[in-house]
Amino acid sequence: MESKDKLFSDMKIVLADAEDLLKAAASTSGERAAELREKALVSLRRAKEAMQDAQAAVVEKSKAAARATDDYVHDHPWRAVGIAAAVGFVVGIMINRR
């Protein structure tokens, strides 16, 4: 959770920096504008890579959770049926109260 918050914080900073660089590049001409645009592009590229890394980590964790759940259900099928029935019962009660 902490790494997710840090990632989003870093993303906001990178995007704000890129926005500032692009605004500065718009009001500047020539070689300086090209430098500012390049810096903005590098910042955005880093942000994109960080998001792709985060996405890959989430996908990997999801796959691991799915494998663990599948293994548990195969090892303990009757417990899984009991848990599913209990969850269904509780959800049914909650829906019926509305």
Image (cartoon, rainbow, N blue to C red):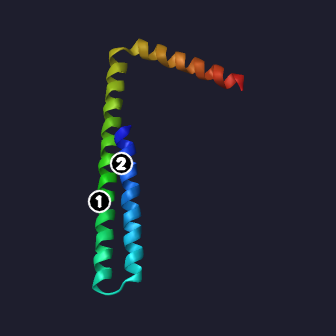
Q: Is residue 38 left or right of residue 82?
A: left
Q: Label 2: which residue? A: 7
Camera-side residue of 81 and 56: 56
Residue at x 69% of width, y 22% of height: 96
Residue at x 72% of width, y 27% of height: 98
Residue 91 is situated, as x and y percent measured from the top left of the image, at 60, 23
Q: Is residue 48 above or below residue 97?
A: below
Amino acid at circle 1: Arg
Q: Residue 66 falls in which quadrant of the image?
A: top left
**Precedes in sequence: disc 2 or disc 1:** 2
10 Å crowding of disc 2: few (<14), some (14-19), many (20+): some
Q: Is residue 76 above or below residue 9?
A: above
Residue at x 41% of width, y 62% of height: 16
Residue at disc 2, secondary structure: helix
Q: Label 1: which residue? A: 46
Camera-side residue of 32 and 3: 32
Q: Is residue 64 above or below residue 35?
A: above
Amino acid at circle 2: Leu
Single out the residue that lies furthest toward the bottom.
30
Residue 57 is situated, as x and y percent measured from the top left of the image, at 30, 42
Q: Residue 36 falls in which quadrant of the image?
A: bottom left
Q: Is residue 95 left or right of residue 11?
A: right
The Cα–Cα distance between marks 2 and 1, rounded to whole angstroms, is 12 Å
